[in-house]
Image (spheres, rainbow, N blue to C red):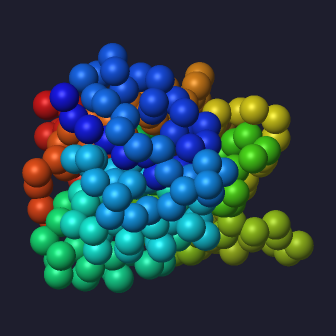
Amino acid sequence: MLKIALIGYGRMGKLIEQIALQNNCEIVAKIDPILGNDITADTVADADVCIEFSTPDAAFANIQKLIKLSKNVVTGTTGWFDELDKIKLLVEDAGTGFIYGSNFSVGMNLFFSIVESTAKLMNRIEDYDLYGLEMHHKNKKDSPSGTAKVLSEIILKNIDRKNFAQYEKLDRKIEKDEFHFSSIRCGDIPGMHSISFDSEADTIELKHTARNRNGLALGAIRAAKWINNKTGFYNFTDKLDEIIG
């Protein structure tokens, strides 16, 4: 049975705890400021893998501590990925295993592939302009989401007429080479992402809607099982085929 330490005990941490036993995993530690504890050699001693779902301002420090303690880490926290290169160097120096993702849902990662394939096709048809939209619950702390950024990267890589992602409110006419991706935060929405292609004749919409966060939690557990006893720095999307087996 895989032994997991939860770093962050918010909605995702609690959900992972709920489904861990169903997936042959044991939660051996729960670490969060609200619980009055911290990451130390003692608090994570029994863990095979640590799953980190905290906040954008805490994730980098959390992961640094865990790597220095020679722990393999899964992180689903977004909003801090400008520090990934530093984490990669730490992982290589420590000889540990680390896997991150903007979204651990298997369905969303399939959606990434669908968007990529469609973008390659639509690149040849300049009649279509395109935009992105995402919606999340009011407590989400980053905007745009990490998932929105991944989708934008896919579009910019595969649509030659789009060179820049624009996430901000515009008080001007949008430039032809800008890809506008808007974000909405409201209520308890688990997550919705869409990419739309619009022409004078019609609109083609690709859309992924999460009914709940179960897919994210299960994906994180699958990632933890995969990274156990491995070394190296990995992106969940790149390793999806191996993880889902």
Query: Residue at coordinates 61% horizontally, 37% vertically from top-left?
Result: 11
Q: Residue at x 61, y 54 (%)?
A: 36
Q: Is residue 82 above or below residue 215?
A: below
Residue 62 position, x and y percent, is 46, 67
Q: Is 57 above or below relative to 155? A: below
**Residue 176 visible in rendering:** yes
- Asked whether 154 or 233 is in front, the reply is 233
Residue 116 seen in render:
no
**129 left or right of 235 in image:** right
Residue situated in front as seen by the camera: 8 or 92: 8
Identity of the residue furthest to the front in this view: 42
From this viewpoint, which residue is outermost toward the right? 171
Q: How many marks?
A: 0
State left or right for residue 209 relative to residue 18. right
- Measured as percent of width and height from the top left, residue 54 is found at 55, 55
Quarter of the image holding residue 105?
A: top left
Residue 152: image location, x then y, percent: 51, 60
Q: Quadrant of the C terminus?
A: top left
Residue extending furthest toward the top = 22
Picture residue at 11% right of the left edge, 51% below the top: 229
Q: Residue at 44% x, 78% y: name it.
A: 83
- For the N terminus, the image quarter is top left
**Residue 184 at what x, y percent from top left?**
77, 48
